[in-house]
Amino acid sequence: MKIKTTLTALSLLSVVAFGASAAQSVDAAQASKMTDLGAISVSGITGAPSDIEQAIADKADSKGATAYKVIGINDDNGWHATAKIYK
């Protein structure tokens, strides 16, 4: 349940807080219309959920992605998240 709440919070934050980032969070319907570039993960991030969201966006940008969809997140001993990236 905590993971669902966190994913929901991250989705909402991505719409509001990360308009300046080149890579944007997308939902499953949007992702299905894009080219799948694979998966990325980030870990050891401390702070708020917005910090992990920014780390995901930054890594997606570095891989040439224009969008990402978070597929897993855990906050055990620092944030760890996995996301699919798209172009």
Image: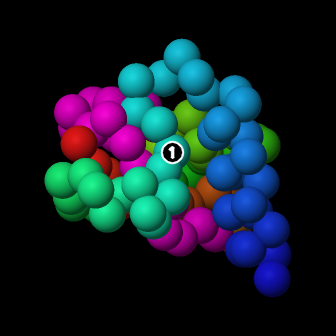
39 left or right, relative to 10: left
34 left or right, relative to 9: left
- Magenta segment range? 57-74
Quadrant assignment, res 79:
bottom right
Nearer to us in this view, 57 or 80 = 57
Q: Where is residue 73 in the image (x, y as percent from the top left)?
A: 59, 67
User: Which residue is rendered at x = 72% and y = 74% of the image?
Assistant: 3
Q: Position of residue 2 (x, y in %)?
A: 81, 75
Q: Can residue 69 be seen in this view?
A: no
62 left or right, relative to 5: left
User: Which residue is rendered at x = 68% and y = 63% of the image?
Assistant: 7
User: Which residue is rendered at x = 59% and y = 43% of the image?
Assistant: 53
Q: Where is residue 82 in the image (x, y as percent from the top left)?
A: 44, 63
Give the image's coloring scheme: rainbow
How many neighbours does mark 1 have within 10 angstroms: few (below 14), some (14-19), or many (20 or more)?
Answer: many
Nearer to us in this view, 12 or 46 = 12
Q: Count of labels shown? A: 1
Nearer to us in this view, 28 or 42 = 28
Image height of 24 relative to 25, above or below: above
Q: Which residue occupies the extreme bottom position in the image?
A: 1
Quarter of the picture holding the N terminus = bottom right
User: Which residue is rendered at x = 63% and y = 69% of the image?
Assistant: 74
**Amino acid at dot 1:** Ser
43 left or right, relative to 78: left
Queried whether the magenta region covers residue 56, the answer comes back as no
Q: Is mark 1 on a helix, strand or loop?
A: strand
Image height of 79 relative to 19, above or below: below
Quarter of the picture holding the C terminus = top left
Residue wearing tag 1: 25
Q: Position of residue 34 (x, y in %)?
A: 25, 52
Q: Is residue 26 visible?
A: yes
